Amino acid sequence: MREILLVVDVQASFSPPHWLVTGIRAVANRMPSVATVERHDESRTPFERQLGRHPAADDASLVDVDRVFIKYGYLPPREMLDHLVAMKPERVLVCGMQTETCVLAAGFMLFDAGLTPTLVKDLTVGSSIDRSGELGTSLWRHHFRQLITVAELDAQA
């Protein structure tokens, strides 16, 4: 099966747990992979004005991938979507930070583009409102149905 891994916002300013970074690195080493990194530019996305906080202006991905796409705000950039569509994957495995916000936003964008977003549910962490990621996982299941675990990926290999 032609799969691509999308790593969402696994970067120092979001303090990902070590187990998450290690787990994602192991999967990224096995297949084509891309990542998003969220950076702050108040002229593009009003994080500071509206939320009183913001990501770093110069953060980098903590996972080595084939290509990194910089984003400003919740949605992945159009260039990333165009790149993934051109690769024609059977499914896009999605993992990373903030299951119920940025990860879910990526899922909607992939779905709307005709791709098959599949959440790697044990390689995501929710936001501070639900660090377990269960809210995001439930929303993902409701909207896209496609979920997988690392053990299920290993069994398919």
Image (cartoon, rainbow, N blue to C red):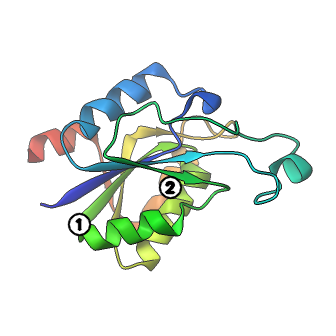
In this rendering, position of residue 24 left or right of residue 13: left
Asked if marks 2 and 1 touch (Cβ < 8 Å), the reply is no
Return the x and y of residue 22 as percentages of the image width and height: 35, 24
Q: Residues within 10 Å of mark 2 (few under 14, many from 20)?
A: few
Q: Please determine whether, in this image, residue 58 is positioned above or below residue 81.
A: above
User: x, y (%) of residue 121?
Assistant: 39, 45
Percent of width and height locating residue 135:
57, 50
Residue indicated by mark 2: 138
> Does residue 76 lie above or below 47 as drawn?
below
Which picture quadrant has residue 75? Answer: bottom right
Q: Residue at x 25, y 67 (%)?
A: 87
Q: Nearer the viewer, mark 2 or mark 1?
A: 1
Left or right of residue 98, residue 31 in this image: left
Tell me the SS state at disc 1: loop
Say left or right for 15 vs 55.
left
Mark seen at residue 89:
1
In the picture, which quadrant includes the C terminus? top left
Residue at 85% across, 47% down = 51
Compared to residue 38, the image places residue 92 above or below, namely below
Res. 142 visible in picture: no
Quadrant location of the N terminus in the rendered image = bottom left
